[in-house]
């Protein structure tokens, strides 16, 4: 059985493989019943944004991780991928700055994902 932390690892690695920018993970388990973790990142352009989402979707499928849904896929500047206990937000940079989820969820502790991200 895949734990939420296992899912988080698979998702972060997949996003990093497609050069997701400034990836961070928040532990929201004590703040909302919606998920255990939120993963937030941005992409440089539409093509990269789609590539990140597609890579995450493929890696989840390979690992047997169910995806509840993907919102904002057609021309969206913010795509949300819901893998039940891990919710992924992939933005265009401008949208990430505008919505500033990191500030909204400031009470959520950051998760150390450094071991899953290739050194810059």
Image: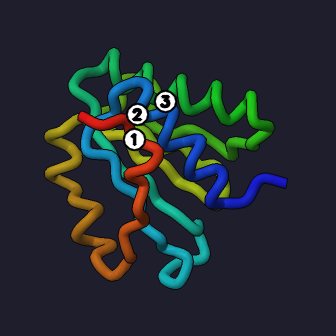
Q: Is residue 108 above or below residue 119?
A: below
Residue found 24% across the figure and 22% down from its top: 45
Which of disc 1 and disc 3 is earlier in sequence? 3
Residue found 59% across the figure and 49% down from its top: 82
Q: Is residue 71 above or below residue 87?
A: above
Secondary structure beneath dot 3 equals: helix
Residue 115: x and y, percent? 44, 49
Left or right relative to 90: residue 83: right
Return the mark for residue 16: 2
Q: Are marks 1 and 2 in contact (CB under 8 Å)?
A: yes
Residue 75: x and y, percent? 36, 23
- Kindly identify which residue carries mark 1: 117
Residue found 40% across the figure and 24% down from its top: 18
- Give the mark toward the camera: 1 or 2: 1
- Between the residue at mark 2 and the residue at mark 3, the CA separation in whole angstroms equals 11 Å
Which of disc 2 and disc 1 is earlier in sequence? 2
- Kindly identify which residue carries mark 3: 53
């Amino acid at each position: 059985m895949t734990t939420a932390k296992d899912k988080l690892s698979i998702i972060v690695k997949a996003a990093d493989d497609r050069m997701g920018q400034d990836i961070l993970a928040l532990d929201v388990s004590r703040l909302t019943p919606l998920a255990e973790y939120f993963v937030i990142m941005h992409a440089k352009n539409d093509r990269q944004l789609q590539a990140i989402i597609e890579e995450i979707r493929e890696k989840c499928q390979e690992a047997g991780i169910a995806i509840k849904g993907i919102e904002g896929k057609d021309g969206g500047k913010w795509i949300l991928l819901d893998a039940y206990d891990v919710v992924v937000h992939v933005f265009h940079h401008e949208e990430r700055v505008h919505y500033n989820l990191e500030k909204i969820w400031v009470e959520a502790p950051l998760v150390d994902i450094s071991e899953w991200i290739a050194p810059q």
